[in-house]
Amino acid sequence: MKILPLGLGIAAAIGLVISIILHADKTRVSADLTGAHMRASSLRDELVAAGTREASLQQRLVSQDSTLAETRSRLSSSEARNAQVSREIIEMRLQLEAGQATIGRLERETGELHHELALTRLNTPTITLEEVEGYLTAISTLEARVAGLEEQIAASQPPVADPGRSFPVLSVSPGDAFVVLGYGTDDGARPAQQLRVTRGTETVATVQISEIRGSLAIAQVQPDSLRSSLRTGDSASIPSSP
C-alpha cells in the first residue's frame, strides 16, 4: 500500500517538471516569434525605403537622359549653324579681298587723275573751267566710291565681343576638363580666346576656347587656374585689358 502513494508522488513530480519545461519552451518560442516579427517589420521598412530610393534614382536618370538628348540636339543644330557661318565668313573674306583690290585700283586712278590735273595746269595754261570741273567731278566720284567700299568692308567685319560681357556656362564635363558656353560666332567668339569663369564675385577658373559651334563654344579648362569645381550656371567673361 505504501508503493502506490510513492508512485503517485513521483508521477506528480515528473508532471510538474514536464510542465515547467514546456512553459519555458513556450516562453522562449514566444520571445523568438516576437523577435522575428520585429525583424520582419524592420526589413519591410528597409524595403520601402529602398523602393523610394530606386524611384528617385529612376526619376533622376530620366531627367539626365532628357538633358543629354537636349544637349545633343542643340550641338547638332549648332554644328549646322557653324557650317553655315563658316561659309559666310569665307564669302565675306572673298568680298573683303575684292573690295580691297577695288579700293587700291580706285586710289591709283584717283592719284593718276590728280597728277594729270596738275600736269595739265602746268603745261596747258589755257585749260577751260569745264575741263577742270570734269576732272574734279571724276575725282569726287572715285573718292565717293572708295568711301562706299570702305563702309561696306567695315560693315562686313564679324562682331567682336565686348570685354566684361558675361556668357553662361551651359554644361560641365566630368572632372572639370571642359565646359560648354552660351557664347558663339554671332557673339564674337574666336578660337584660342581665353575667358574668366566666375561665380558671384569669385573667379573659379580660366578657360580657352577650342571649338565654336554656332551659338555655343567648347572651352578647355586650364588646370592650374582651377580654384573650385565648376557648375552649370557659372558665368564666363572676356577679361578687360589691363
Image (cartoon, helix red, strand yellow):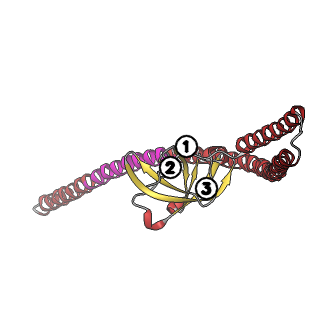
Rendering coords of residue 146 (x, y %) = 78, 43
Kindly give the residue lying farthest to the left in the view shown. 2
Local crowd size for mark 1, using a 10 Å CA cut-off: few (<14), some (14–19), many (≥20): few
What residue is shown with label 3?
Answer: 218
Foreground: 152 or 178?
152
Q: Which amino acid lies under the numbered mark 3 shown in the image of this protein?
A: Ile
Does the CB distance between marks 2 and 3 fall below 8 Å? no
Rendering coords of residue 50 (x, y %) = 46, 49
From which residue to which does the magenta span run?
28-54
Give the side of residue 195 with respect to residue 153, left or right: left
Q: Which amino acid lies under the numbered mark 1 shown in the image of this protein?
A: Gln
Local crowd size for mark 3, using a 10 Å CA cut-off: few (<14), some (14–19), many (≥20): many
Label 1 to label 3: alpha-carbon separation: 29 Å
Residue 59's mark? 1
Q: Which amino acid lies under the numbered mark 2 shown in the image of this protein?
A: Ala
Mark 3 residue element? strand
Residue 175's mark? none
Please tell me whether the stretch drawn in magenta is mainly helix, strand or loop. Answer: helix
Q: Quadrant of residue 144?
A: top right
Give the side of residue 36 with respect to residue 211, left or right: left
What residue is shown with label 2?
Answer: 236
Label 1 to label 2: alpha-carbon separation: 31 Å
Foreground: 197 or 133?
133
| Image quadrant containing the C terminus | bottom left
